[in-house]
Image (cartoon, rainbow, N blue to C red):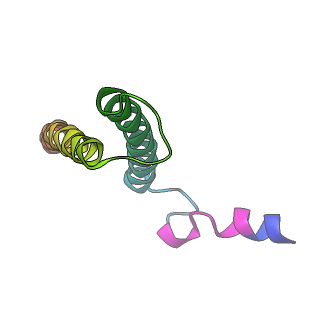
């Protein structure tokens, strides 16, 4: 069956008697957290920028509204990149001290 196959080869590649590599698990967890954070960020960014830029919801965005949203998202992404760079370098420092 499908489910037995999945369970048996999960972690068999490490060769350590079926022990999982904790580093690998951490990487996978970090990726999933990053994906969740990115989705939340996009959601928040969209909400914020739309509220900030769009006075009256209509069928379409006019030029100034489009420009406003683009600028708003750019600034948001810039600050997010700054934060994540700082976070990543801290992670690397902590890993080096382990």
Magenta-colored span:
6-14
Relative image position of residue 69 (x, y in whole percent) = 28, 42
* Picture quadrant where residue 8 is located: bottom right
Vertical side of 86 occupied by 31: above or below = below
Q: Main secondary structure of the magenta part?
A: helix
Relative image position of residue 52 (x, y in whole percent) = 30, 27
Task: Check if residue 7 falls in the magenta segment.
Answer: yes
> Which is nearer the eye, 37 or 2?
37
Relative image position of residue 54 (x, y in whole percent) = 35, 33
Q: Is residue 15 visible?
A: no
Q: Residue at x 44, y 56 (%)?
A: 21
Task: Check if residue 75 falls in the magenta segment.
Answer: no
> Which is nearer the eye, 87 or 95?
87
* Picture quadrant where residue 77 is located: top left
Q: Quadrant of the C terminus?
A: top left
Q: Is residue 73 visible?
A: yes
Residue 5 vs residue 32: left or right? right
């Amino acid at each position: 069956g499908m489910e037995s196959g999945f369970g048996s080869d999960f972690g068999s590649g490490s060769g350590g008697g079926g022990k999982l590599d904790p580093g690998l698990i951490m990487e996978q967890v970090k990726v999933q957290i990053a994906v969740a954070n990115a989705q939340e960020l996009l959601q928040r960014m969209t909400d914020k920028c739309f509220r900030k830029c769009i006075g009256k919801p209509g069928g379409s965005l006019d030029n100034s509204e489009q420009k406003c949203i683009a600028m708003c998202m750019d600034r948001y992404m810039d600050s997010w990149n700054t934060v994540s760079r700082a976070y990543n370098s801290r992670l690397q420092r902590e890993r080096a001290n382990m």
